[in-house]
Amino acid sequence: MTASPLKTKLLEITQIGSSRAGVLDIQEKYWPKPGQYLSCQKFTEIPDVLTTNLFSILGNKGVLTLEPIPQNWTPGDQVQYLAPQGLAFQLPSSARWVGLLPFGVSPLRLLTLVRPALAQGASLILFLDPEQRDTFLSFVPSSLEVLPLSALKDNLDWLDTLAVDIKREDLDVLSNLFLGLTLSITGEVLIRTVMPCHGIGECGVCSVKTKHGWRLACKDGPVFRLAEILHVAQ
Amino acid sequence: MWLNELKPIHKRDLVLKHPYVNAPGTLGFAPDPHQMPFLSRLGAFTTNPVSRKSRQPAGNRVCLPFKGGVLLHTGHPNPGIQRVISRNRHRWADAPLPIIVHLLAEYPETLYEMVRKLEGLENVQAVEIGIPPGCDSSLLEAFMEAASGELPLILSLSPQEITLLETVKNSQARAVHLAPPRGTLPNPKGELVSGRLYGPATFPILLQALKTVLHAQLDVIASGGVTTQKQAEILLNTGAVAVSLGIVLWNVHLGALFPEKPG
């Protein structure tokens, strides 16, 4: 990973539900993989107090769309960023049925797994909260099957792998969802938490409890193995 | 202790090549030249706070933005002095700049133990003591007595703690590190959380505190929400021997702080 900053321009901004997303003009070799993040700051004389960590979301092919774009950024702004950081989702190459579970968050980050999953011949099921259905259904590719969250347990046996996107404070609720179940599938969890030092300071704000002890989402994540996270009191 | 021609250099003094250090809690436990291209601009590296036994992250850990800064509350998670040393001693020895280990003073006996473990480690050239909230003069005296030894001592004090200056003057402390002030904000759930305040909004507070500590004729490393070279110069011209850099080191680009030299 290079620590030297790179420069780009914010080309456009769009609002998708509660997500404020934008298109940045970045070379493909610096595109973050699903789950990774770009630490960014607007290039002004006095920068924002903290960097913003941007994640890729489903957008037009060949275009890098990221969120969350800060409120004080406008199209045309010069932005500086570091090369992609963090651990990305690793779709098992043998997976033929992939489940996507955006737990209390928008599905846009998980939808970046659609193209790689389809490319390896997998089928996808999106478990979508009824409250988000109206907002996001139009963004979901027609190749995905969309089921309500309540159908998750009944469909676990059909899945080869599960990708979850969740806020750190909801991890206990996620564990409750799987209480009493023997998980035979693999899975990964993108944990949403503030990462103010983006790995440089080990500040501890983004600490996540795993089966093997405390880990930092900024360096050891933000994607963690599902088995490491479930049923670990935070 | 510093390249201060008005004072004699002691046998185990810490000499800073550049008048900048990082604030504890900003750059981890050891320098990483790959992630920290600005290391050559620092005069010393300060570790994250270290306690005798391991500490877990605070349950209500948080980063709360406010106008001009952020409040950070983490609980100072760290694996404990023994593990910090075993994991980092070689990186400290190989580091391109001197290492200052920041210790969390909990009891005088445990502080004594931690300081003794650091003495003799290659390139560890000073110890910085962080005192607990509510520390009074007699406890501070006990901490300073416990920490006295081969390594120069730096005492970390927030502006709220400079009431302890008289005790500091009579102690073995070679310098005071003026630390970020403490504050309280509500978290998204509405619960009040206390922590340290970082960012440019704290600059006036720290500049005022700097004047007070200088009046007590102590060497000061001043932390203060510095984000530009101009602010750093103000602190140095006011009398600080060095400037402590906080979350500005998390910026993607440090051009405002370390402008590119022409040519």
Image (tube, grey):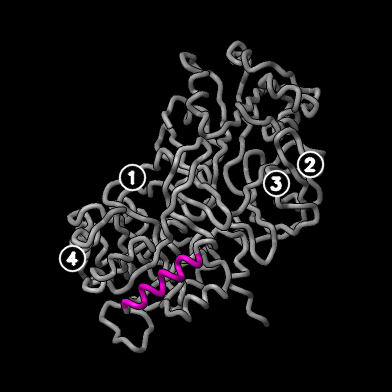
- Residue A201: x and y, percent? 48, 55
How far apart in space, not on screen, are marks 3 and 1 (Cα)? 35 Å
- Residue furthest to the bottom in view is B6
How far apart in space, not on screen, are marks 3 and 2 (Cα)? 9 Å
* Residue at the spot 20% in from the left edge and 69% down from the top edge: B149
Amino acid tagged 4: Glu
Amino acid tagged 1: Arg
Q: Earlier in the sequence, mark 1 or mark 4?
A: 1
Return the residue nearer the eye: A220 or A117: A220
Quadrant of image for the N terminus of chain A: bottom right
* Residue at the spot 80% in from the left edge and 56% down from the top edge: A76
**Marking on residue B130:** none
Q: Are marks 2 and 4 in contact (CB under 8 Å)?
A: no
- Which residues fall within the magenta stretch? B203-216
In the picture of the structure, the residue carrying the numbered disc 4 is B145
Front: mark 2 or 1: 2
Q: Please tell me whether residue A110 is drawn above or below residue A221 in the rendered image.
A: above
**Marking on residue A14:** 2
**Marking on residue A69:** 3
Q: Which chain does the numbered disc 4 sit on? A: B
Amino acid tagged 2: Thr
